[in-house]
Every structure is written in C-alpha cells, then in structure tokens.
Amino acid sequence: MPPPPGHREIQQEELSRLFGRMAGARLVALPPILALALWLAFVEPAWWRRIGLAAVVAALGVFFVAEWVAWRRRGFTPGAVPRNLAVGVAASSIIAFATGGLASPFLYVTVVLALIIGVFVPFPTGAALVAAQVAAAWLFAWLGASGAVPDFAIAVFGGGGRDPAPAAFAAVPGPEIPVPPPPGDEPVLDLAEGSRILGRRLRQDDLIALEGIGPKIARLCNEQGITTWRQLSMTPVPRLEAILAAAGSAYAVHDPASWPHQAALLADGRWTEFRELINRLRGGRY
C-alpha cells in the first residue's frame, strides 16, 4: 500500500526538527568535551595524545557550528545524516585511539553510532561505516597487544592486563628485594630536564615511565615491594617474570628483560640514554 499523500513531507519535517535539536544539543555539549580534552592533556602529557585530542576536538567544534549554521540557513538536507554519522565514526575512532583503544570509555560511543547508522543510513553507505568501526576495533586490539605505540594505554583510564588473577596480590616467592643505597648516595635528579628530553612529564620513581609498564603492572611491582627505579634496576629478571606469571595469563605478553636496564638509566638521570634505549624497544622488548 503506498503511503498517504503528504507522508514524505511530514517525514522530512520531523527529520529536520530532530536534526535541529541534535545540532543544538551538540553545541551545548561542546564546552564539557573541550574541558575533558584539556584535562586529559594535562594528566596524560604524551605529545601524540595532546596533538590527537586537540586536533579532533577543534575539528569537531568547527564542524558542529558549521552544521548548525547550515541547518538554520538551508534546513535539513538528505545528505546531512550520513555526513554527520561519518564524521562521528571518524571522530570517535580517533578519540578512542588517543585514550587507550579498547580500554577507552569513549569506545562505547561506537555502539550507539552503529545502531543509529543501521536505522538512518541505507546500504551500502551504512555497511561501510560499520565496517570502518569494526576495523578500528581490530586495530586497537593489535596495537594494545603488540605495544607498537608507546604509552598506548592511558593511565587515567587504566592499562596493562585486563584479567588479573587474585594471586597477583599474593606474595611471590623469590629473592628479597634489594635495599637501595642510602638517600645521600643517590644522585639528585633533574626531573625537569628529563621531562624536556623525553617530551613528557616525568615523576620521581614513577614505574609507568618505563617502556612496557602500565598502571596495573606498576601496581603489581608495588605490591611486591618494588617502588623505586633503583629497586627495579636491582631486581633480577626471573623475579619479575615470576611476578607476572602469578598475575595470570593476561600478563604473559609482557617481557620484563629490559626493565632493570631502563630503570637503572632513570635512577642515574641518564635521560638521553634512556630515550635512545626506548626508541629501540618495541613494547618494552629488546
């Protein structure tokens, strides 16, 4: 049965009204998004993360305003929905990449976008957009497993393994943790200079500064009494392997062979040598 007369016009009018509300709501949401991006750039100062977040948020702001102005001038056009959803897929993928990939809370936005695409975007455009989302998710999984991107797992949202076993917090048999030299024998570290050379904020004895160590692995080391760069530099690799093994299979992909070497360079303030070393490593591996 054909639709009644005027059905298409009514549908177009309702879509225009809905799209206008969405465009206005995005402008309201823009300041909190900007604030969140600035906060993430402050607490996670990796240069590539700052650039990625700043670029995508700025581009989204310009796009949101331009779409709202276009709607006010010309009203709703048939290409507006696919165009906006395509931008949404690209922006959500970039933001998820910059905030930890599969560990990013922004990844759940892709589920909502996929549902909207299925309703409003016809084949084959809709299928291509969903395929792009799936490809991005697989890329994030590969990046997280391979360690190809340094500091990929953002600290504020968690990182490292996802499935720690209860045994991770039990004492791991092994040699005693070496006692570091007395404070007077330790060199005074110029952390500001180290931050400048490494291009990211450096905090004293922050184990996450090492290539291959995320927040969860740092916590495992702390639970076993390894809390400083000097202590980690004096910890035998078999001891570190035992700590990872006790934490469960999720940590099997990590190789701690380079960690004592990295920690020794940091403990001695040899920032340039540390930077050269981590540039040669792949996910903390030699």
Image: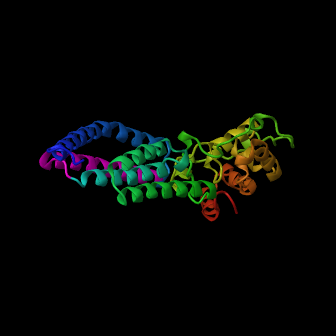
Residues 173 and 125: in front is 125
Instruction: Tell me: residue 98, above or below residue 18.
Output: below
Residue 17: image x %, image y %?
A: 20, 39
Give the percent coordinates (x, y) of residue 239.
Answer: 82, 47
Secondary structure of the magenta portion, mostly? helix
> Which residue sits at x=57%, y=51%?
151
Q: Residue at x 36, y 58 (%)?
A: 123
Image coordinates for residue 22, horizontal then vertical, percent? 27, 40
* Residue 188 in view, yes or no: no
| Up/down of 131 relative to 18, above or below | below
Residue 283 lies in the magenta-colored region:
no
Residue that protrudes farthest toward the bottom in the picture: 280
Please indicate whether residue 80 sits to the left or right of residue 230 in the image: left
Q: Nearer the viewer, residue 274 or 163?
A: 163
- Residue 130 position, x and y percent, is 43, 54
Q: Give the magenta part as a residue range.
A: 49-77
Pick whichever, 79 or 282, lies toward us.
79
Q: Nearer the viewer, residue 253 or 34?
A: 253
Using the rendered image of the protein, determine whether residue 201 is visible from the camera's viewpoint. Answer: yes
Question: Is residue 92 found left or right of 18 in the rendered image?
Answer: right
Residue found at x 68% / y 39%: 219
